[in-house]
Every structure is written in structure tokens, then in C-alpha cells.
Image (cartoon, rainbow, N blue to C red):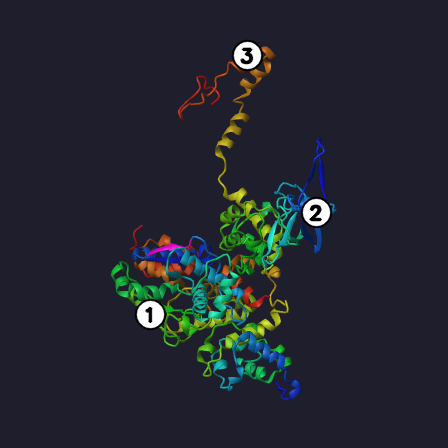
Amino acid sequence: MKIAYYPGCTLKTKARNLETSALACLDILGVEYEELPRWNCCGAVFSLADDDLIHMIAPVRDLIRVKEQGQDTVLALCSMCYNTLARANDLMKNNEEKRDTINRFMDEEPDYFGDVRVVHFLDYIRDDIGWDKVKEKVSNPLNGVKVAPYYGCTLLRPGEVAIDRPDKPGVFEECMNALGAEIIRFPMSAQCCGTYQVLGNPEAALKVSFDIIKDASSHGAEAMVLTCPLCDYNLGRRQDEMIEKYEGAAEFPLFYFTQLMALALGASPDVCHFELNRDITMEFLKNKNLMAKVPA
Amino acid sequence: MPVNISKSGSDEKLRQRVKDISGQNFQKCFQCGTCSGSCPMTEHLNVFPRRVMALLQLGDRAALEEANTPWICASCHVCMVRCPRGIDIPKVMEAVRQLKLRQNINRIEPSQMDKKEIEKLPQIAMVSGFRKLTS
Amino acid sequence: MATVQEETNVEVKAKLIPIFIMGKQYEVPESLTIMKAMEYAGYKYIRGCGCRGGVCGACSTVYRKPNDYKIYTGLACQTVVEPGMYLTQIPFYPALRATYNFFDLEGKPDEVFELYPELFRCVACNACTKVCPMDVEVMDYIAAMKRGDIKAAAEISFDCIQCGLCASRCMGELPQYHIAQLARRINGAYLTPRAEHLKTMVANIEAGRYDEGVSGLRAMDTEMLKKTYQEREMEPATAGEDWTPKDNQYL
């Protein structure tokens, strides 16, 4: 069964490490996927104005592309894209009046009725592949790795598109445990990193991100896994600013969970493009002896 | 911060407009404060979410104008999943933002962004930032 | 009524149809292009008219048809008038072009993002593609540019004639055609493969490989030149892939 794959803009440039590592995992797990041949930026955020339909056009167009490709499931890696596509899909499925207006507006596209299934990598693996299959394929278990799972906002809220219980999510735990790693729970694991406020109020975004990193490391985590390029920017790339500004701030390894998953499943480190992560991640991997066993 | 409670101080047009744009009935809010308690951005706000709802209920346009709340809100939706009255608070915040943005007043100016910033930022930062903070 | 007097003095009447130019009705011959029809109606072009051949983008026209809400566009020099056509010209639509020194660029997507941050305001409404008179898939090349694919943006925007209609309809206020031009410039300068055989040939010429041959030809008189030309060895029309001339001195 083939699924459609929706990358999103950032995964082709700055978050290439998320894409290549995730696709390597899908290959090892035997999932057949095909990137949508013609797609546009989904808009990254779901428009919250009730009377605004123009901002729905972008994600709905991508869902139409899925149908054009003959698929009924589309997988997203970036959690912001997942959230936007899923919410737009729900709107088209449930709101008859808005669906009608949107279909009428897009007169150059076939009508769409919300019948595509939108999934994120994590819930697709959990529901359609199963963690047991993942465990079977682990050839390089992440022994001794203590990671904090960072869910962020868009995977768990609002409830209609949540891939897990918003108050007590467990899907990251299940994933990391299947790979042999130990999960460190921490209170702020689903707290917002500031997202787009990096543009509007960079200091506010920096502070909330710093609080999250501090919380994770003070609970014993040695690294953090996430699934969104903007979270990666706020929590990871801005660590230089954190170190400059806040006492007690230090370098903290950050991974896309698919990078660790790819290593655990025996993929070559090349597909993980660790050069796009912070330098400290390579040190961390070497200390944990995770690079040694991987075939060249 | 004093709050005006007088018939002349209540801007009915404002309340109706926010109701229309958000599709939410903020009259249902009974000021429990769960939203303020959940909001991750409170240390940067001059008016907490609970109070914003109160100001809307009272139609206090002047006080609402001074609140930086809608501009610091990151649409994280924690308030929405916890609101006991089921009010979609992020939608209300979006409506208050749109009151300004639809007058063609941008909160941030794309053309004035620092080029070095743009070089570092992932594309989704700009896509989402422009959608939320520009008209 | 228009008449065309032929030599045999037969009156030939061209069929006239009504069109509306900027809201005013005119009767024009039905076979004319919009541009010729406007001139027939008495308009004189000093701007908004260029090559008259469909490639310069000066004469972009927007029109509607009776009982039809849709917006139609076309180049005035290429589009034939229709009865009831309701038109105006948009010879120029302001679109901000970033100032840059091309040779300071390295051809990276980030540079395009820095010069045109409004690129991220695109909402994929497709108004641009719908309005393009050259059928360029504008939304698609903007989408390609957003994800950093300069090559695709350059290839998709190839037929653009910079008429400006896309920018006039854009919700996000992007200058699409300026962004596309930058993409094509970067693609041509940095991304397309270089013609290595051309480089080799130029090097050979400069090294003097053909000097003797050329000076030999130059030294010939007209008769000798004619004889040499007529007796030259030509590749037969049905030659296979591996044919080579007898004299391969200059290959």
C-alpha cells in the first residue's frame, strides 16, 4: 500500500536532515511512499479567523494533489505541516458550507470532500506498522541514550488532530523505547517553543525555549528529540543566543527523532546529515558509541 | 489597571466584529483563569488572556488596544484544550489581531527584516510569522 | 460602415462588432486584434505597445465577456476581439525589484529569500496563474522558490514576458516576475551545466590550431577559393553516426 509523502518547504533546504533520515527509516521499514509530484507550501499555520477561507486554499490544494496521485493517505514529517493539513482536511470534511465555497473558488481544481487521511510519521508507524516491526529491524540499539521527548504544540493540539492524548502523550516514548533508548519525562515537553514569535518577539521566544531546555536537562535528559524545523531553530540553533543571555545555559544536543531512528535501524550516518545539527550532537553520538557499529 | 464598566464605554461594534471573525461566543467565559494559568507567554504579557476575555465582554476598546497579548500569543492552543467553557481562545486572539491587520497595518515588516536573520531562519518561520503578523 | 475598395470596385464590408474600451462602446471589425481595434477606434499608442509580436509584455489587457463573471487576460497584439468584450489595458503594474549586484551573489536560495522576503506571503491562491497571458504556472514557480528549488523556478517561468499581470492580482503583494527573473539569472549563471566543448573549442582556436587553415584560405584567389569550395568533402545525407571525413586535420 503506497502512501503520498508531503515534505513541506523547509525539508528541502535547512531541515534536509529530517527528510533524508525519515525516508531512510521508511525504506528500512518497507513502507512504500511517493513524494507528491506537484505541491505548494501549506501555509505552516492554520488560519484561525472563522470568516477567512483564502488561507485554507493552500493546504486543501495539497490534499487535492494527493487524490490526483491516486493515494488516500498523506504522510507529513514537519509537525506544523501535519497540523495545518489535518485541520484543513477536517474543515473540508465537516463544514459543508465552507467546503462548497472553497471548491467553488478553486474552479481550476477538482472538488475535494475531505476524504484523504492525513498522518504524521509517528502515528503512521504506531498505527499502521507497529512498534514490534520497528523493534525487529533495530540493528544498532540506542543503549544508554537518555532522551527527552519534545512534542511541541502542533502534534497534540487541538484534540481533533492530536496524534495522542494532549495531557499524557506517549507516542515518542513508545518510539524511543522500541529503539532501545530511555525516555526522560519532563513537565514542559508539550510546551510551546515560541514558534513564529521568533519574528515578532524574539526575546520572548528565546526565553520560553530556554526554559524548555533547562527543564529537560534538569530532569536528567542528555539530549532531546523533536519533529519540527521551527522548534529545532528556536530550541537548537538559538542556543548560542541562550548561552550569551542566560546564566546556566549550555549546549544541549538536539535531534530529529528520525535521525536517531535511522541510526538504530542500521542506516548509514550519511543519510542523517548530522552536519546540519549542532556540533555537540556528533560528540554525543560518539560518546554513546552510536557511530561505531554503523556500516560504512 | 482600571476597567471601564459603563454603557458608553462598551463598544458593541467591536464585540460583534470579534464574535464574527472568531466565531466564538466569549460571553460564555466565566473568568476561571485556567487560560492565564496555562499560557507559556505570561511573563511577557501586559494583559493576561483571562483579562483579555473580560475586556472583550465589556467592549473596552481602549484597554484592548493597549494589550500586547494578541501580538505575543504563539497560538499554542493550551488554553483552548483546557478551557472549561470550550471557548476557542486562539480564535478570539486571531480575531483581535485581524482587527488591526485587516486595516492593512502590519505588525512586522517583511521588507525591514534583517538579512542575516533571514539567512538563518527556516522558511516556515517566515511563512507562519507573515501569516500571523502581517496583513 | 467600413468598405474596402478593390480594383474591380466591388464593395466588401467588414463585419463590425461592439466592444467596450475603458467603458465606452465602439464598433470595430471583428477580425482585428485588440490593439488594432483600439487604433481603429482612434486610440494612438505612445505607451503600452511594443513588439506587436506577443513577446515583449507591454500590451497586457484585462477583459470580461457578457454574462460571464470571469476575468480574462491576453496580450492586445495577439488577442482577437469578441462581441461585447469589455476591456482595459494594464500596460504597467508597479512591482518592486530588489537592488542587488548579481556578481555579489553565490546563487543560494537564501539570497533570494533575503532579497524578496515577501515571497513567504504567498497563500497559493493561484490568481497569478489564472491571469497569466502566457500560461506560465506562476504559483508553481513561486512554490518551487519557497522550497529553495531555483532550477525548477527558472524552468517553470521560462515563458514569462514580464507583463506584470501576476503582480497586479497577487494577494500577498509579491513581485512574482522579478523573483522569477532572479531565479533564471542564477540558474543560467550557476546551475546550468557549462558547455565544456565550447570551452575546448575556444581554447583550441586561441592556441592557434586553425591559424594555418584560415590563412591558407585567405591567401587563395577567388578562382582557387571557388574550386576549393566546390570540391570540398561533404557529409552524405545518409551518413551514419560513425562517418568521418577523409581529411580530419581540423576535427
- SS category of the residue bearing label 2: helix
Given the image, on which type of amino acid does mark 2 rest?
Answer: Met
User: Which residue is nearer to you in this view: A95 or A257?
Assistant: A95
Contact? badges 1 and 3 (CB < 8 Å)? no
Q: Chain of mark 1?
A: A
Spot occupied by residue C189 in the image (x, y as percentages of width and height): 54, 42
Dot 2 crowding, Cα within 10 Å, few <14, some 14–19, many 20+ = many
Query: Are dots 1 and 3 on a single chain?
Result: no
Comparing labels 3 and 2, the label whose residue is closer to the camera? 2
Question: Who's the residue at 71% across and 31% down the image?
Answer: C7
Circle on res. C227: 3
> Taking B83 as reference, is A1 left or right?
left
Spot occupied by residue A187 in the image (x, y as percentages of width and height): 40, 76
Q: Is residue A232 above or below residue B16?
A: above
User: Which residue is nearer to you in this view: C190 or A3?
Assistant: A3
Q: Is residue A132 visible?
A: yes
- SS category of the residue bearing label 1: helix
For label 1, the residue is A173
Magenta stretch bounds? A32-36
Given the image, on which type of amino acid does mark 1 rest?
Answer: Glu
For label 2, the residue is C38
Q: Is residue C221 visible?
A: no
- SS category of the residue bearing label 3: helix
Given the image, on which type of amino acid does mark 3 rest?
Answer: Lys
Estimate the spatial distance between the alpha carbons at disc 1 and disc 2, rounded to whole Å. 72 Å
Q: Which SS type dominates the magenta stretch?
A: strand
Question: Who's the residue at 56% across and 78% down the image?
Answer: B19
Q: Chain of mark 2?
A: C
Q: Is residue C13 magenta?
A: no
Q: Is residue B35 above or below residue C54?
A: below
